[in-house]
Image: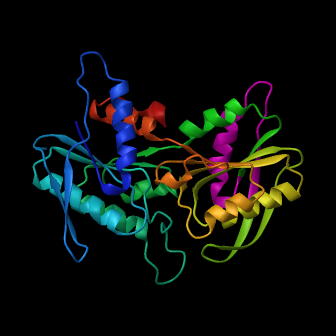
Amino acid sequence: MEIFACRASKDFSCKVIESINANLRPDELPIHLGDLQLDLFSDGEFQPLYAESVRGATVFIIQSTMPPADNLMELLLTIDAAKRASADKVIAVIPYYGWARQDRKDRPRVSIGAKLIANVLTAAGADRVMTCDLHADQIQGFFDIPVDHVNASRVFLPIIDSMGLPNLAVAAPDMGGAKRANSYAKRLTREGRECGVIICHKTRERANVVSEIRAIGDVEDRNIFIIDDMIDTAGTLCKAADVLMEKGAASVRACASHGILSGNALRRIHESSLAEVFITDTIPHPELEGDEKIRIISMAPVFARIINKVYNYEPISIDF
């Protein structure tokens, strides 16, 4: 096993390595982060270089593909370099799969970016893809190679459960998130405690601009967790939280797999009625260390476990 990190996910990769080494058997040797160098040209072009042999190795390359597009391009070039260096298998570990919101042709003359990226990853030489909470589950079908789709519920559910809040409910910020919210509610419901489901119906003026949100379900005196796959501008999230509080919710918190946090997202969150927001570290945000409202939960142990199982050909269905 060889694990390499591109620039955007270097800190995340170090956590993965640390987690793998912490769970090694006594007869297993510790793993190190591979030496991947990058030659930079004055015009911004770059070329990855493996400073150690990967011949015959199973190579895991970790990189989230959030903007700028250089992050995706760096991943593609690194995959290509591994194949040309005679790696046996190349597995792209993409904690955040960018362009996933372009998963269908919802208007005339638009691209389907999620499918294009799937094609490009395969063309670059990836033998397998590992990612977390795709914007739509059906994106897995865009690939002709295996896809391991990790769920952030593995880290969020224990946190929600440990808080022991009464009158618990989960909310979907839009109709598309109803399935995810229902899944959380089922797993949080147990003897003596029922977890309700609330659906927020939203209408948009245009991309990233929400005009109206209506809450469907029992909100009164509920401690609510809004469950989503990403927070971009935080417009939908904050507006949904305000609507839920206006309808009598006791408190509103949020769990989102990917904290994109573009534009004025941070300001909106801090000025909103949200009590807490939990995001994962699939997208790096070192500036949020110690933030009073936004808590970052690491997905590295989950990815470490899946990487180890995939390498050793162990069943992984229990992790999904």
Kindly tell me whether residue 195 is visible in this rendering: yes
Position of 21 compared to 226: left or right? Answer: left
Q: Is residue 151 magenta?
A: no
Q: Quadrant of the N terminus?
A: top left
In the picture shown, does residue 229 fall above or below 112? above
Q: Is residue 177 magenta?
A: yes
- Which color scheme did the rendering employ for the protein? rainbow
Q: Point out residue 286 in the picture as x, y percentages from the top left corner.
A: 49, 52
Outermost residue, bottom direction? Answer: 109
Image-based side of 190 in relation to 96, left or right: right
Looking at the image, is 109 positioned above or below residue 234?
below
**Rendered residue at 82%/61% (across/down):** 243
Residue 162: x %, y % from top left: 68, 30
What residue is at 49 percent from the left and 48 percent from the top? 281
User: Image check: 197 left or right of 232?
Assistant: right
Q: Quadrant of residue 175?
A: bottom right
| Residue 160 coordinates in the image, percent (x, y) | 67, 37
Query: Measured along the vertical axis of the image, is residue 239 above or below residue 96?
Result: below
Which x, y percent locates residue 35? 20, 46
For this orientation, the residue located farthest to the top is: 26
Q: Residue at x 74, y 49 (%)?
A: 275
Quadrant of the rendered structure where residue 30 is?
top left
305 sits to left or right of 43: right
User: Which is more toward the observer, 259 or 166?
Assistant: 259
What are the residue bounds of the magenta stretch?
172-200
- The residue lying toward the viewer, choosing from 92 and 139, is 92
**Residue 174 visible within the image:** no
